[in-house]
Image (spheres, rainbow, N blue to C red):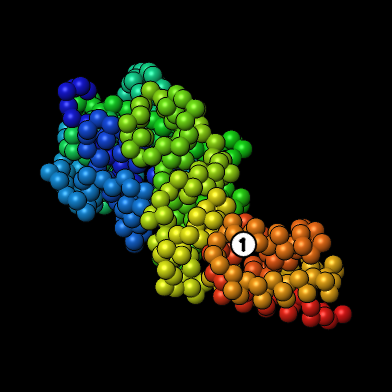
């Protein structure tokens, strides 16, 4: 590749459903490389397989990239000079190139019907259409030229297949894996153009990468077996000198390291593998995403970046700008990266802690709204957040950790109080309520000092009277520092909860 060319990379998903985190990582690495080198990040929708097209999937892909903060420079939504950006809209390009390959002797017409190929598969369980059997099948290499012309003229369905050479070594340099070589005799004659006139991935990806002037290709290692076909197409079409640099990314593995991470693994182990919620428009099945589970996009992107890449230091928390600045292909690993959901949760916890309130408050308002709480004063919400921020792993945890700041307890942990309740404690809390009704200033430190002096004067132990106070305010043995809670609730609400709690504590429970 000409090193003076401006960097242009592309993320080229198929609109067939939800976006797996492996796909998002591919998009992320493309984005980081482009931004690091001042280049262009392209989104190209590879929708040539209309049988697998799913309504709404393209918009979903674009929404995922937007949520992650890695929006493309060129896409179906942001057209540039290399459009259109959907392969289905570039259909006429592909036939011309496929016919050129046939004319140059690098491809051929194949007229075999689906039934004929199915019969071959029954005879040969590992059947491949290749140099071993192409002369016995119905194609322009085995049929007389006149018969081939007749079939085409009469509109007989056919596909165009690449003619793989025999006994050649096909090599290329991968930016991650070094020199990679294949024996051409072991690669079958892939279909390049289907009977409906649409190209397969193999032809379309090469033609579009050329026409869009793509300089670097980052894709998953599962595409390595297709590389020899693509290398030959670049050569056969006369574009080898402008072929992009290749980088085949390591797989994201199951948590136990045994095989590629799949949606079934997430279903089985209880974690998402899609970036955002995906609802299948045909079945209505909902697959939960990282966003809806309560992940911040910063944490999701940070976690993904370290699945197969590191900067060579012990640093683990990176902003998107830091990732752009430090990203290097040389630091991408060849080995597969095990997905660790506990580690993913850690990233989210850390990013919640370091995020500014103005970033979190709108999302926390959404959490509250789901529980019927609306129109919360932003200053109050920010104060609550400061008390529970360290306790949040996911954003929805906010309700569990802080619901008592927005409504009085529905129930009390009476089992923790009543067995040791005494008349003396009733007297203490009755007097404490009366004194707190006029207490000033209503600050955490002053409240704590006053309360503990009162305990000391009563002759009882601190532990005997701290827990009942907490349970009066929040309903159970949880929450941040109890005097911080009281200070934030305010005098009127604290006193009201103490009265209500005391009544519950002294009321005999049913046997």
Q: Is residue 392 left or right of residue 416?
A: left
Q: Residue at x 23, y 27 (%)?
A: 243
- What is the quadrant of the N terminus in the image? top left
Residue that numbered label 1 is attached to: 447
Q: Position of residue 134 (x, y in %)?
A: 35, 33
Q: Secondary structure at mark 1?
A: helix
Q: Position of residue 126 (x, y in %)?
A: 50, 36
| Residue found 24% across the figure and 42% down from its top | 42
Query: Can residue 71 be seen at all in this image of the molecule?
Result: yes
Residue ranking furthest to the front = 457
Compared across the picture, whether 89 is left or right of 194 comes to left
Q: Is residue 334 visible?
A: no
Q: Residue furthest right?
A: 511
Across and down, in percent, residue 89 comes to 19, 52
* The C terminus - image quarter: bottom right
**Which residue lies at the image location 48% right of the left edge and 73% below the top edge?**
373
In which image quadrant can residue 26 be found? top left
- Disc count in the image? 1
Left or right position of 56 against 18: left
Q: Is residue 409 above or below residue 80?
A: below
Q: Of all residues shown, which one is farthest toward the left?
A: 81
Near mark 1 (Cα within 10 A), the count class, few <14, some 14-19 or many ≥20, is: many
Question: Seen in the image, is 421 located left or right of residue 356?
Answer: right
Q: Considering only vertical position in the picture, is 430 above or below 45?
A: below
Residue 292 % position (x, y): 47, 58
Residue at (49% x, 75% y) in the render: 372
Q: Is residue 51 above or below residue 135?
A: below
């Amino acid at each position: 590749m000409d090193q003076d060319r401006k960097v242009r990379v592309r993320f080229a998903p198929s609109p067939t459903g939800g976006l797996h985190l492996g796909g998002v990582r591919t998009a992320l690495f493309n984005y980081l490389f482009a931004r690091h080198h001042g280049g262009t990040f392209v989104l190209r929708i590879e929708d040539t397989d209309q049988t697998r097209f799913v309504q709404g999937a393209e918009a979903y892909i674009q929404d995922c990239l937007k949520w992650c903060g890695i929006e493309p420079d060129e896409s179906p939504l942001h057209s540039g000079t290399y459009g259109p950006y959907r392969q289905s809209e570039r259909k006429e390009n592909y036939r011309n190139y496929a016919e050129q390959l046939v004319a140059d002797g690098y491809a051929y017409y194949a007229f075999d019907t689906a039934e004929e190929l199915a019969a071959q598969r029954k005879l040969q369980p590992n059947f491949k259409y290749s140099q071993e059997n192409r002369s016995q099948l119905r194609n322009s290499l085995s049929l007389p030229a006149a018969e081939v012309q007749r079939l085409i003229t009469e509109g007989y369905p056919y596909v165009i297949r690449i003619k793989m050479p025999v006994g050649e070594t096909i090599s290329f340099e991968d930016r991650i894996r070094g020199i990679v070589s294949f024996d051409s005799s072991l690669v079958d004659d892939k279909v390049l153009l289907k009977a409906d006139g649409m190209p397969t991935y193999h032809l379309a990806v090469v033609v579009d990468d050329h026409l869009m002037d793509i300089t670097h290709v980052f894709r998953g290692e599962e595409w390595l077996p297709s590389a020899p076909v693509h290398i030959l197409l670049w050569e056969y079409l006369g574009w080898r000198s402008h072929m992009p640099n290749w980088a085949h990314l390591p797989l994201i593995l199951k948590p136990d390291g045994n095989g590629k991470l799949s949606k079934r693994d997430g279903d089985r182990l209880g974690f998402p593998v899609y970036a955002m919620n995906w609802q299948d428009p045909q079945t209505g099945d909902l697959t939960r995403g990282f966003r809806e589970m309560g992940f911040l996009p910063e944490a999701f992107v940070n976690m993904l970046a370290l699945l197969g890449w590191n900067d060579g230091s012990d640093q683990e928390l990176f902003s998107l700008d830091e990732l752009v600045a430090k990203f290097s292909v040389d630091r991408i690993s060849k080995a597969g990266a095990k997905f660790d959901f506990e580690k993913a949760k850690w990233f989210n916890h850390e990013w919640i802690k370091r995020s500014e309130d103005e970033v979190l408050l709108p999302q926390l308002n959404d959490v509250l709204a789901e529980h019927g709480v609306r129109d919360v004063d932003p200053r109050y919400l920010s104060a609550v957040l400061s008390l529970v921020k360290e306790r949040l792993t996911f954003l929805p945890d906010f309700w569990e950790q802080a619901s008592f700041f927005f409504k009085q307890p529905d129930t009390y942990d009476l089992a923790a109080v009543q067995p040791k309740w005494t008349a003396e404690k009733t007297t203490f809390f009755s007097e404490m309520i009366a004194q707190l009704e006029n207490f000033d200033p209503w600050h955490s430190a002053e409240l704590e000092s006053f309360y503990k002096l009162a305990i000391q004067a009563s002759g009882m132990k601190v532990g005997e009277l701290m827990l009942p106070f907490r349970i009066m305010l929040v309903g159970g043995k949880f929450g941040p520092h109890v005097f911080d809670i009281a200070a934030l609730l305010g005098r009127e609400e604290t006193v009201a909860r103490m009265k209500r709690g005391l009544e519950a504590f002294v009321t005999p429970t049913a046997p």
